[in-house]
Image: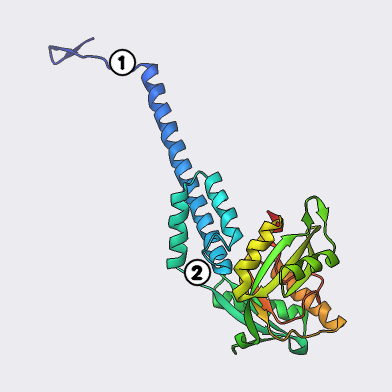
């Protein structure tokens, strides 16, 4: 194309851009956006899995042989397209960087004790939550700064499904099995319409009992060393209703990660926390 400018003829070359080139540029932008979105999604998944890793390690320890929740978490890592090496690195980091846990003790009726732990709330937020919750329930509870850990001892706790080989085991049948396995105690409970048994043993028999339970073909939902009351207390019907309200409040808060109590098992119709394995 020629253009007259001050008596001079200038030759101007037109730039021609094909629609094919523009399409290619748009396609690259789409690929880049997709990669960025996938990277952000994977980073978020890694963060969520790491938070879960810390909770599981704290509750049941870092050994996959004894902590069945870790075995399940490893499958979740694989399903999220993370390698086993990534899982092992996360497990190592979870041990090197223990989670910050806020702990507050609640004293209840008849000498009942509730040690409430949270990994998602600061100490102040946990205090505010418990204060508000107890005010709604009414009198009978108070917060304490004293250490009541001496009222508890470490016990092995293994929770299994009541169904074995397509058969629902009765409490009598389970008690007979527990006698054979040298288990100290067994408690029956229900969660989301399913029946479970909680097997209790002394600390030094935990690994042995867990191996025996698995060998018998039970479906282990979770297993860990936990604080267990040395001298469980009895409560009356009215007190049980109040404690049930407390438990319901704790169950509704996902940031509450553990609750230890000295109440005799099965005194309350629900457990202080939902069985996460039952909800999966």
Q: Quadrant of the N terminus?
A: top left
Q: Is residue 7 left or right of residue 78?
A: left
- Label 1 crowding class (10 Å Cα cut-off): few <14, some 14-19, many 20+? few
Q: In the rendered view, would you say 225 is above or below 138?
A: above
- Looking at the image, residue 187 lies above or below residue 65: below
Question: Which residue, given by chain and number where applicable, does mark 2 sit on?
Answer: 99
SS at mark 2 in the image? loop
Task: Mark 2 or mark 1: name the one nearer the start of the chain.
Answer: 1
* Near-viewer residue (86 or 29): 86
Task: For residue 254, say whether it is visible.
Answer: no
**Residue 151 horizontal/vertical position (percent):** 65, 87
User: Considering depth in this image, is 268 or 60 the residue closer to the camera?
Assistant: 60
Vertical placement of 102 versus 112: above or below?
A: above
Query: Badge 2: how crowded within 10 Å, few (<14), some, or many (20+)?
Result: some
The mark lying in front, picked from 2 and 1, is 2
Q: Is residue 59 visible in the rendered structure shown here? A: yes
Q: How many marks?
A: 2
Q: Circle 1 — which element?
A: loop
Question: Seen in the image, is 79 located left or right of residue 97?
Answer: right
Q: Which residue is rendered at x = 47% and y = 49% of the image?
A: 84
Q: Residue at x 12, y 12 (%)?
A: 7
Q: CA distance from mark 2 to mark 1?
A: 61 Å
Picture coordinates of residue 143, whole percent (x, y) = 65, 86
Residue 177 numbered mark, or none: none
Check residue 16 in the rendering and tell me which mark sits there, or answer none. Answer: 1
Give the image location of residue 62, x and y in percent. 51, 64
On the image, the x and y values in percent for residue 118 come to: 59, 71
């Amino acid at each position: 194309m020629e253009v007259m400018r001050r008596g001079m003829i200038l030759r101007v070359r037109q730039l021609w851009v094909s629609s094919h080139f523009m399409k290619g540029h748009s396609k690259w932008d789409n690929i880049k956006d997709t990669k960025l979105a996938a990277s952000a999604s994977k980073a978020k998944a890694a963060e969520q899995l790491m938070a879960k890793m810390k909770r599981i390690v704290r509750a049941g320890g870092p050994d996959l042989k004894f902590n069945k929740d870790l075995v399940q978490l490893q499958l979740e890592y694989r399903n999220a397209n993370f390698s086993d090496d990534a899982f092992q690195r996360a497990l190592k980091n979870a041990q090197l960087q223990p989670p910050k846990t806020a702990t507050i003790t609640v004293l209840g009726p008849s000498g009942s004790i509730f040690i409430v732990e949270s990994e998602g709330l600061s100490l102040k937020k946990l205090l505010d939550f418990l204060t508000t919750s107890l005010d709604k329930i009414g009198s009978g509870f108070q917060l304490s700064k004293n250490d009541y850990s001496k009222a508890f001892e470490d016990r092995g706790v293994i929770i299994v499904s009541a169904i074995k080989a397509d058969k629902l085991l009765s409490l009598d049948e389970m008690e007979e099995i527990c006698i054979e396995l040298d288990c100290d105690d067994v408690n029956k409970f229900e969660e989301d319409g399913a029946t479970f048994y909680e097997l209790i043993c002394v600390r030094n028999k935990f690994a042995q009992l867990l191996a025996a339970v698995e060998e018998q073909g039970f479906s282990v939902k979770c297993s860990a060393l936990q604080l267990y009351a040395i001298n469980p207390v009895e409560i009356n019907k009215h007190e049980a209703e109040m404690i049930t309200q407390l438990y319901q409040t704790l169950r509704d808060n996902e940031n509450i990660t553990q609750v230890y109590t000295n109440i005799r098992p099965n005194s309350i119709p629900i457990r202080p926390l939902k069985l996460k394995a039952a909800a999966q």
